[in-house]
Image: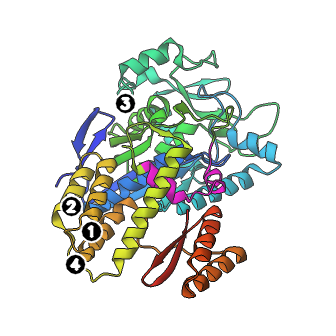
Amino acid sequence: MALKLFNTLGRLKEELKPLKSPAVGIYTCGPTVYNYQHIGNYRTYIFEDILKRTLDFFGFKPFHVMNITDVGHLASQGDEGEDKVEVMAQREGKSAWDLAKFYTEAFLKDCASLNILPPDVLCRATDHIQEQIDLILRLEKKGFLYKTSDGIYFESAKFPDYHKLMGKAHLSGIQSGARVEANPEKKSPSDFAVWKFSPKDHKRQMEWNSPWGVGFPGWHIECSAMAMKYLGESLDIHCGGVDHIPIHHSNEIAQSEGATGKPFARYWLHGEFLLVNSSKMAKSDGTFITLEDLKEKGFDPMDYRYHCLTAHYRKQLDFTWEALEASKIARRKLKDWALNMASEPPKPACADFFNAFKEALSDDLNLPEALSIVWSGLKNADLPKGARASFVQQVDRVLGLDLFKTEEKTLSPEIADLLKKREEARKSRDFAKSDQIRDQLSSLGILVEDTSSGQKWRQK
C-alpha cells in the first residue's frame, strides 16, 4: 500500500518515493526559544510526530532533524527590530544564553508530556554559525547577495522560481506591500537578510565575527545550513506550519537551491492553524494558551494530543474548552477499554480493521478517519477481546496515545481516606453510605466504578 502525502510544492497528493528508500530524511522547523510554546505550536509538532510514526508503520526508516532558533529571529518579518531572544532576556534579567537554554528545556519537557518522539538530531543555530557563514559565502560567490547599511541581503529577483512554493497569488500580495519594507535600502520587499550587522549604539550578547563584519545570522539561513549539514543538499521531507510558506520556507528554498543548484526538499508538508473560539490565538485577548494552562484546568497533555487527532492536519482546528473536555472523556474511555482488553489472551489482529486503518493513513495521514476505525474495531463485539487488543496495540504505534500504559495514580490523603471508607461501606453492605461517598468523590473529580475485582477509580 503506497503512502500518499500532500506536497505543497505541487499542490497535490503524491506517492512518497524517498531518495534512498527505506531511509527518509525529514527536517522540521523547531521553536524560537524566547518564551513558552503555545498549544497552536504543539499542534504542528504533533502532526510531525504522527508523520514520523506513520513512516515507521509503513516500513520506512525516518531520520529526523529539528532546529532550535536561539538567535536571529527578529521581531519584524521585514528583518527589522530586535532579536526576540535578546529582548526577552533583558525583560527576565537573564543572559540570552541562559534564557534560550531555559525555554529549550521547557519545550523538550512539553514534547515528552505529549509523547512526541525526540528528533534524531536537535541542532541549535548558535552551534552552527560557521556552517551558516560558509553557506552565505557560496551565495555571495554566485552573485545572489548585496550589502546595505544593516546587513547582507539575498536578492529574490535573481532566483526565478522564488514564488514556486507560495504560488503567484501570494507573490503579488507580497510585492504590493504584504511585507513591510522597513529597510528602504532593500531592492524588493521579498529580499531577506542572511547576515545582520550588530548595532553601533550597543553590544549584543550574541554576535560573531564574519567576513562582512561583526553580527549574527538571519533567521532563514540557519535552517538551510543545518538541514544540508545533516541530511545532504537534497532532502526528502520538510515540514512546518502554513505560516512558514510565504516567507520562511520560500526563503529557504531560494538560498538553498541558489547555493547548490539542486532541489532542496522534494516534499513540503504544512500543518494548518489552531483557532481559539474561531479566532487566531493572541496574547492581547487572553487566548495564548500553554500546556501549563491545560494542566491547571485539570487536563492531561495527552487529552490535547487526542484532540489534535480529531481534525486533519491540513484543516483548521477550532479549540474550545468544551471540545477539549469531549476529547478528554473520549481518550479516557478509549484507554479504559484498551486496558480492560489487555488482560485477555492475545489473538491475531483483525485484518479488515488493520487494513482500513492503514488505508486511511495512506491518504495523506487521514487521522480522523483512522481514529473512527479504531473506535469501530473496539466496539465490534463479534471480535474476541484479544483480537481487538492486538489491533489497538498495533495502531497505537501511530496514534501515540500510550493506551496500554498504566498511569501512575497519586492520591491526596483526603481522597485515599474516602476511597477506603467507601470500600468498607460496600463490604458491610451499607450502600447508602457507599453512594454518599461516591458522590463526594465525584465532586472532588474522582469517578468510582464497582467491578468484580473490586473498586476502581479514575480522575475525571
Q: Residues within 10 Å of mark 4 (few under 14, many from 20)?
A: some
Element assignment for label 2:
helix
Q: Could you tell me which residue is drawn at 32 percent across and 34 percent down? A: 9
The reply to whether the C-beta atoms of the residues labelled 1 and 2 are less than 8 Å apart is yes
Circle on res. 290: none
Q: Residues within 10 Å of mark 1 (few under 14, many from 20)?
A: many
Circle on res. 353: 2
The reply to whether the C-beta atoms of the residues labelled 4 and 3 are less than 8 Å apart is no
* Residue hosting label 3: 165
Q: Position of residue 119 (x, y in %)?
A: 47, 60
Magenta stretch?
289-308
**N-term-proximal mark, 4 vs 1:** 4
Q: Could you tell me which residue is drawn at 42 percent across and 32 percent down? A: 254
Q: CA distance from mark 4 to mark 3?
A: 48 Å
Quick check: 390 above or below 325?
below
Q: Nearer the viewer, mark 4 or mark 3?
A: 4
Element assignment for label 3:
loop
Q: Amino acid at mark 4?
A: Lys
Kindly tell me whether residue 29 is visible in this rendering. no
Q: CA distance from mark 3 to mark 2?
A: 37 Å
Circle on res. 391: 1
* Residue hosting label 4: 347
Q: Nearer the viewer, residue 363 or 339?
A: 339
Task: Please state, as top left, top right, bottom left or bottom right, where the N terminus lies in the image.
Answer: bottom left
Task: Please state, as top left, top right, bottom left or bottom right, where the C terminus lies in the image.
Answer: bottom right
Q: Amino acid at mark 1?
A: Phe
